[in-house]
Amino acid sequence: MAVISYREALNQAMREEMERDANVFVMGEEVGHYNGAYKVTQGLLQRFSERRVVDTPIAEMGFAGVGVGAAMVGLRPIIEFMTWNFSLVAIDQIVNSAAKMFQMSGGQFNIPIVFRGPSGPAVQVGSQHSQALESWYAHVPGLSVVLPSTAYDAKGLLKTAIRDDNPVVFMEGETLYGMTGEVPEAEYLIPFGVGDIKRPGKDVTLVAWSRMVHVCLEAARELAKQGIDAEIVDPRTLRPLDTAIICDSVKKTGRCVIVEVGWPQAGFGAEIAYQVQRQCLDALDAPVERVCSDDVPMPYAKNLEDEVQPQVKDVIAAVRRALYLD
């Protein structure tokens, strides 16, 4: 298999789907002539022309709404937000138009639209550009919420999203674009609602998504030196959520630590903790632990930014608490 970056995997997915279906088009700020703020749409303008790769003004509410209307008449828009923080300007179109149109029209309108872009903290981009908003969108019926952690998952899930007849919130890890991994040259799709075991283990279950998967992988390597064998479960999609793969793992290990870069109050990890305790209570040998960012806006200073976000040491400490070692 070819080894390509997360960024290249996303680009391949869009290119292949645009070649397969002439109704697929990309729209957003700087997606065309600038090749995308993070170069995810690089080369698409040259391949597909301005008719299908549309540069927009800085007007998220406007072009998100145009995308919803285009989807209603049979096109398949891919709407890029330069960052998911900017989606807050367009949240009415995402939540009140895209997510509800099928139900409110009595099934007359499908909305085959993908909202995609970088999500979560980057590096010193300030509190207004460092938010993890997946729990907001996962709260909304009518939306699928997807957060790939690897290049392989990014390509397979984005192709599935583009072919979906319903709106998809596709959140890419802002610090993952340069990360590389094996991606098959043959076409493949990854269905929504199917998680993945990123590392098998027997002593404790770590549940994480997007960049936190890699924090957990590093923590698992350090835990192995202490004789602790951690299993890492990546749900890949939060809505729909693969509770079966999480609970099967917890029933095996007896312990669960949930790691997310979002804030603790009403974070998605709380929903997972509820599902684990509802379905696996008899298997749990310790309370479910959660590792989140501190409950504060993101600082700008690098040392404080690192301190606020979950680090390997925080995951290790939570695992040791779950094993009653500290």
Image (cartoon, grey):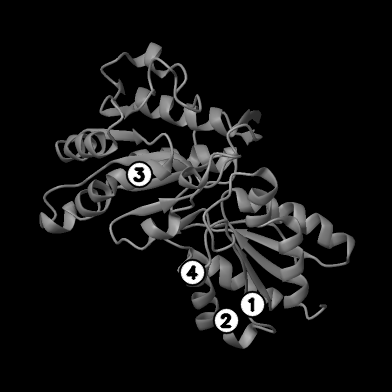
Residue at the disc numbered 2: 280
- Left or right of residue 305: residue 298: left
Mark-to-mark CA distance, 1 and 3: 38 Å
**If you read the primary sequence from the N terminus, does the residue marked by circle 4 or circle 1 appear first?**
1
**If you read the primary sequence from the N terminus, does the residue marked by circle 2 or circle 3 appear first?**
3
Mark-to-mark CA distance, 2 and 3: 36 Å
- How many neighbours does mark 1 have within 10 angstroms: few (below 14), some (14-19), or many (20 or more)? many
**If you read the primary sequence from the N terminus, does the residue marked by circle 1 or circle 2 appear first?**
1
Mark-to-mark CA distance, 3 and 4: 21 Å
Give coordinates of residue 149: x percent, y percent.
58, 46
Q: Residue at x 44, y 55 (%)?
A: 134
* 174, 250: nearer the viewer: 174
Tag shown at residue 87: 3
Where 8 falls versus 219 (above or below)? above
Residue at the disc numbered 1: 251
Where 298 falls versus 36 (above or below)? below
Q: Amino acid at mark 2?
A: Cys
Answer yes or no: do the residues labelled 1 and 2 have beta carbons within 8 Å?
yes
State whether residue 202 appears in this view: no
**If you read the primary sequence from the N terminus, does the residue marked by circle 1 or circle 3 appear first?**
3
Q: Which residue reaches farthest bottom?
A: 282
**If you read the primary sequence from the N terminus, does the residue marked by circle 3 or circle 4 appear first?**
3
Mark-to-mark CA distance, 1 and 2: 6 Å
Q: Amino acid at mark 4?
A: Gln
Tag shown at residue 265: 4
